Image (cartoon, grey):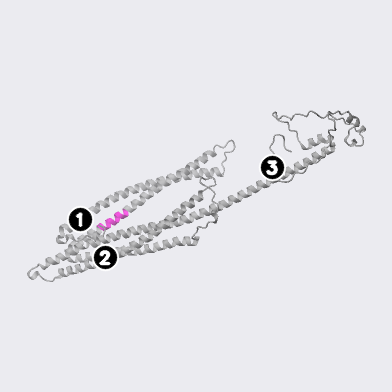
Amino acid sequence: MELTGSPLTATYARPRSTPTKFLPAISTMASSYKNHFPYHPLPQRFSLPPLPSTSYKTAAINPSLAPSSTLSQGLTPSKMNDFVSNRTTPFTQYTPDDWYRSNLTNYKESETSRRNAERLRVDTSRMIQDKYQQTKKTQAESTKSLGERLNDIEFWKSELCHELDEMIGETNALTDVKKRLERALAETEAPLQVSQECLLHRKKRMGIDLVRDDVEKQLYTEVDVIRSCQKRMQQYLDKAKDQLVSNRVAQHELEKDLANKQAAHRIDSKCYHLRNTSDGISYYRGVERVDATISVPESWAKFTDNNILCSQGERAASTKLRDNIENLLVVTANEMRYQFNAVNVAFTNCIAETADAKSKIQAHLVKTLQEIFQIEMNIEAMQKAIRDIGPLLKGAQTRLDECTQRPNMEPCQDTAHLCLVNEVHEIDETIQSLQQRLRDAEDTLEVLFRGKSVLEHDLVIKANSLFIDQEKCMGMRKTFSRTVRLLGYV
């Protein structure tokens, strides 16, 4: 039974039973109300409906005088005859038993309806929870799958980026070697011209001095050596140009694949971080029936793997060609230098030593610059690590401070408290060690800068000495290229 002023509850869609025509007995009304309906006082704003103009009067009960038709109800004929009504016809149509049975029937139907409604509510609530949990589980699995897909894309992106960096580095290195080879090839013209001019000058000898001596033989040999070196340099220069084209083709495929991976990663990352409350979500009817896939995981991975393998093959060929060019530069420079030494041993030895010292200084300078770069990167990494660990320390200290605010007996030196204290100490020690290591790296960087300055100054000195030996002392042969020029460095 619903209380007055309360909202109606939902019930099962069942046909309601027709109210019975039986009324309960008057003697049982008080007990039935007391058993089934607790007393609820009406609110102040509640007002009873107006009474009809004709009302009931209180009936007296005298079982000893009741006739046969009303003995069971405890009413006497005399009392019934005393009831005076303003109506011309009898007002009552049912007996108290009918009234009582009708109420009992209504009570049972009300209880049944309430039980059905309660069971429906419980079942509905359970079904909602089950469906919600199943939906959340399915959504979590989809999110997990997207995360795994992101990890796969990240892996191949890293592989592509690594291979692309390697290929770009190799292409740049091969380009540098090609430029060195071009410079070295152009640099061989001056020694060839010097040798030919020397032969022309020796033909102007007169008398007995106009002989084919060992110097003239070495000069002819020098001309042959220089021309042979030029021929080999030109051959490798053509190979380097073809290899650069192949490298750029492989690099283009890597860049295109990487761009696709980045676009896919951006889309999948958006899907991974998309939530049911995110902006921009909408219904897309029938999207699950659209199959726009053109690959499977195996072919998808194999495509990128083939691109990487192709790039690695071209890179290996480029590295081999670059090593061959390096060897060629060294071999040709040595051959020309050796023949030049045969013509003028004294000066050549001095120049060779100076050039070798300069090459070593350059190598050490390159290594020093590389180490300076690595130390600077290390310093930046340590600085970033110190900055990144700051929020960890803040978080640990904040949690520890919050735990100290627990009232009364709650501040307990439990495992959680000890872990927080150890976490704060550990993070603080980490920061201290990183700061100490940062100071050591900065000191090392300063030492490397001083060494760099010394090497650069020494390199200038060696270049000046080489210039003096060649230009001031060699005379006609001062135009012969230095070793670094024959190697294409300058």
Q: Magenta span covers which residues? A: 358-368
Answer with mark 1 or mark 3, whichever residue precedes in sequence. 3
Q: Is residue 124 above or below residue 248?
A: above
Q: For mark 1, what is the residue?
A: 465
Q: Is residue 290 above or below residue 119?
A: below
Task: Using the rendered image of the protein, determine whether residue 164 is visible from the camera's viewpoint.
Answer: yes
Per the model, the C-alpha gap separating discs 2 and 3 is 95 Å
Residue 487 seen by the camera: no
Q: Which numbered dot is residue 234?
A: 2
In terms of secondary structure, where does tag 1 sit? helix
State which quadrant residue 188 falls in. bottom left
Q: Is residue 361 magenta?
A: yes
Q: Is residue 83 magenta?
A: no
- Image point (15%, 59%), residue name: 473
- Residue 88 place in picture, x, y as percent: 85, 30
Q: Which residue is mark 3?
A: 10
Amino acid at dot 1: Ser
Choose the circle earlier in sequence order: 2 or 1: 2
